[in-house]
Amino acid sequence: MSALPGLSLQELLMAASTPRATVLEPTPSSASADVSPRRRSTRFRPRVLLVESDKDARASLAMGLVGAGFEVLAAPAIEDILGELGEGRPLPHLVIAPAEASGDGMEGFTLCARLRDDARTEHLPVYLLSRHEAPHHRERADAVRADDYLLHPVPPQVLVSLARLKAGRSAFAPDYEAHTLRMPLAQVLHALLCGSRAGRVELRDNEGWLSFRQGHVVDASFDGERGLIAIRRLLFFGSGAYAVSFGEALAEGKLLLNLKIYASLLMPAAERFSALCSLGIPLSARLTVDFKRLADMLKSLPDDVGQVIRLFDGQRTVHTALLECSLPEVTTLEVVTLLYAQGVLVPANLIAEREPVPQSIPPFFEPVLRAEEEEEPFSEAFETSGPSRAA
């Protein structure tokens, strides 16, 4: 339980001991921590208050946040950061605190409740981290209106994604905007599945969404597909601005995918797909086969590569070929990348330039008529035979 349970937030601030917090700042060249498409030209340095009793875990999480462009004030106990929440001090953009008390210190549940009861801090986003899951912890997190409740060990990238999503924004906003260029869908979904909340991720620029609930994906839709195929293709092909909304009503459906399977299989596949795309073959490119090069490389190619090669006729895009091929999208893109590097697949316009269309197209075969047959070339074929003609 919390120490000093009857004190208000301001009284706790006055009773706080000398801070033992360490301030860590990103280098001037660090990327902005902002992920909103509305503030692309400004450098946003949100400040995070991070409380973690374990020294190594605190250093790992703090450096992850600093590397992502956040300014971090890290401390071993909640009491060490209370002074940063006092009157006259600029408020941080996010608070990350342990759910359980450290020794006789304060619980994160109590801190969050006090922040919510103070008009000055009631909208400050708060994440609670726990080393063990008690049956009542999730209910308590909901009762104090924490933004989420996560179990250790928390990967630094997960905390970075959650911080990017909410730092500097109200804890109770209807939705939170981000962009796939600054925070890929695979990363934000991993972070959301690590928490206990329910909600929905929805693309703004094209049709696609998925619903999540307490560490599971429960439904998804993308490009006319539903279920697991939609989840995979949404992570591979979904792009642009998107919104994350929270609420049980937004997460209806059956359990499709849990965190363990997602983290071990689907997320690595999405990261591999993204890495292949970064090699430089646009998904909108139209490729065709260089048959001269194919003949040279044919003996060294596996037999099942043929089903990939056949798809590239100069008309299909790489994106279309990935959808039509019977192989998994990542495997198909790996094959396409290899064939492109070997010169078997080339841009369609390159073949057109190398082998231009003839200026004069030879005519089809036509019979040459003799002069005497020009008027009625087939007259003999239609002549009738009979006695009268013979007579």
Image (cartoon, rainbow, N blue to C red):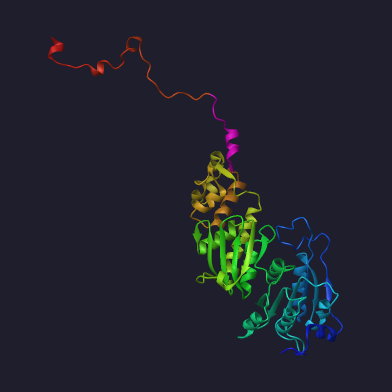
**Measuring 79% from the left and 64% from the top, which residue is drawn there?**
45
Q: Is residue 357 magenta?
A: yes
Q: Quadrant of the C terminus?
A: top left
Residue 234 is at least partly visible in this image: yes
Image coordinates for residue 310, horizontal then vertical, percent: 49, 46
Q: Residue furthest front?
A: 119
Tally of numbered tags: 0
**Measuring 62% from the left and 86% from the top, which residue is drawn there?**
136
Quadrant of res 258: bottom right
Rendered view: 104 above or below 127: below
Q: Nearer the viewer, residue 197 or 161?
A: 197
Quadrant of res 88: bottom right
**Measuring 49% from the left and 48% from the top, which residue is drawn there?**
306
Image coordinates for residue 218, horizontal then vertical, percent: 53, 69
Q: Nearer the viewer, residue 285 or 354?
A: 285
**Measuring 69% from the left and 66% from the top, which residue is drawn there?**
165
Q: Nearer the viewer, residue 94 or 320?
A: 94
- Magenta range is 346-359
Image coordinates for residue 158, horizontal then vertical, percent: 68, 70
Q: Quadrant of the N terminus?
A: bottom right
